Image: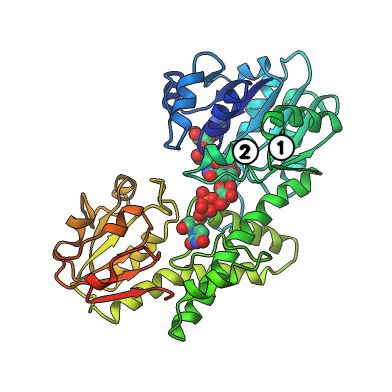
Amino acid sequence: MDVSIVGSGYVGTTIAACLADIGHDVVNIEIDEEIVATINAGEAPIHEAGLEERIAEHAGTSLRATTDYDEVRETDVTFLCLPTPQADDGSLDLAIMRAGAESLGRALAEKDGDHLVVVKSTVLPGTTEEVVGPILEDESGRQIGDGLELAMNPEFLRMSTAVADFLEPDKVVIGASSDGAAQTLRELYSPILEGKQTDLVETDIREAELIKYANNAFLASKVSLVNDLGNISKEYGADAYEVLDAVGLDDRISERFMRSGLGWGGSCFPKDVNALRAGAREQGYDPELLDAAVSVNDEQPRRLVALLAEHVPLEGARIAVLGLSFKPGTDDVRKSRALDVIEHLRERGADVVAYDPVAVENVRPDYPEIEYADSADEALAGADGAVVATDWPEFDDLAFDGMARRVLVDGRRIDVDREALEIYEGLTW
Ligand SMILES: NC(=O)C1=CN([C@@H]2O[C@H](COP(=O)(O)OP(=O)(O)OC[C@H]3O[C@@H](n4cnc5c(N)ncnc54)[C@H](O)[C@@H]3O)[C@@H](O)[C@H]2O)C=CC1
Ligand SMILES: O=C(O)[C@H]1O[C@H](OP(=O)(O)OP(=O)(O)OC[C@H]2O[C@@H](n3ccc(=O)[nH]c3=O)[C@H](O)[C@@H]2O)[C@H](O)[C@@H](O)[C@@H]1O
């Protein structure tokens, strides 16, 4: 099938390379010329396991990139993989989606033959049919159901395992405006669906949109509940990991997403939970549980720093922050809990020295005043205390000999040699 993908960030690039890999002809439409050039040179604009080799294999044959929206006319289906960021008030900002839909609609005005537009971005219920659809109709001069079809196909991939998640998903969700649109997507995904443990969910567009938010809201709230229970465990002097590992053996609960600690960050959970809260309020419903999930999450970095302060007077102290990315395996620092930890440490007068194996350069511009180390050993040298903010595997081998005081407060339950420390405190154990 000939496929165009508008937006070539984490989602657009990953799915373009993977769709080329399963036999489709794919073109990425992207406004950033550097990303376009990178893909056309056979290289990956983002770091994801398995991506570079797929782009290298297909670039120039079944995968290419361009800034020219007119190329969508050579394709049967277009995926919109544009950002849907959070506005200042927490609500969903659709400005980029609107702009992309306008450009796409204008290009489609000149197309011969039918076209299917699929919203892949995370959008609140109603957005596909009430915002994207009408823009496409206005700009293309076509009507949905007459030369133009609409679908919503949310994406569940995780950063750092994006390729594997896309090619072997738990589920594919298709919300479509017609049977024909659903059939096109079933065909497109058939190599992924056939003979695998993947559930296909076919539903209406509104449900497809909400499934994505419900999924992320559930996972984020699960981690917040785990953290609430973790904080209670700590108060009782119990080890939350022993408690929750046992709880996870109940298959109604599951052992996944049970790691308590510093909480959730990243480019999606925070903005998606906030968009759903704002959307619910607009509909007249008070989402109290989601509000609580956010406040538990907001408190964890402050709790970590308070725990450290029980052992180290922070004013003027040199404190090593180990890990800056929002989770291991990525250099993404958007809404990383590590940044909140740095803020709290600085508020209390500590001198921060930070280390991360890959994410330092993404933090430095916003925090030019803190010190950065080239290794964990260098960060720990002379430190009066340290905190673990991201569970990078290399932190399991930390050595503490160079520290002025061997005090470590662990926000991520790394597998560290606790005997080598004067004081080891876990946030929830
Ligand atoms: N990053 C992730 O792990 C996941 C993201 N999502 C959702 O997918 C959507 C996209 O997210 P990401 O890929 O992370 O965003 P991103 O920010 O990494 O990439 C978006 C790309 O769109 C480009 N762009 C912006 N305006 C454009 C326009 N008018 N025309 C063409 N290209 C344009 C940008 O230059 C950028 O390269 C969001 O709704 C997000 O919530 C869903 C599942 C996973
Ligand atoms: O909508 C999205 O963009 C994506 O958001 C998350 O994926 P991602 O943000 O890449 O990362 P996760 O692995 O889910 O981790 C999110 C945060 O939760 C934290 N977390 C996760 C699991 C856990 O047990 N404990 C915990 O604190 C992580 O440290 C991280 O800060 C979802 O897992 C994906 O399914 C979804 O597609």
Which mark, by number, is residue 414? none
Characterize the local packing of mark 1: few (<14), some (14-19) or many (20 or more) Cα atoms within 10 angstroms. many
Residue in front for this viewpoint, 1 or 66: 1
- Assign a secondary structure to mark 2: helix
How many marks can you see? 2
Q: How far apart are marks 1 and 2 (CA)?
A: 7 Å
* Residue type of the residue flagged with mark 1: Val
| Sequence-wise first label, 1 or 2 | 2
Can residue 151 be seen in this snapshot? Answer: yes
Which mark, by number, is residue 97? 2
Can residue 83 be seen in this snapshot? Answer: no
Residue lying furthest bottom: 236
Residue pointed to by mark 1: 132
Quadrant assignment for ligand 1: top right
Q: Are marks 1 and 2 in contact (CB under 8 Å)?
A: yes
Q: Where is residue 46 in the image (x, y as percent from the top left)?
A: 43, 35
What residue is rendered at 67% in x and 50% in y?
212
Left/right of residue 130 with respect to residue 253 in the rendered view: right
- Assign a secondary structure to mark 1: helix
Q: Where is residue 314 in the image (x, y as percent from the top left)?
A: 24, 75
* Residue type of the residue flagged with mark 2: Met
What residue is rendered at 30% in x and 48% in y?
357
Characterize the local packing of mark 2: few (<14), some (14-19) or many (20 or more) Cα atoms within 10 angstroms. many
Q: Where is residue 44 in the image (x, y as percent from the top left)?
A: 43, 29
Residue in front for this viewpoint, 21 or 79: 21
Q: Position of residue 188 (x, y in %)?
A: 71, 27
Left/right of residue 354 with respect to residue 1 in the rendered view: left
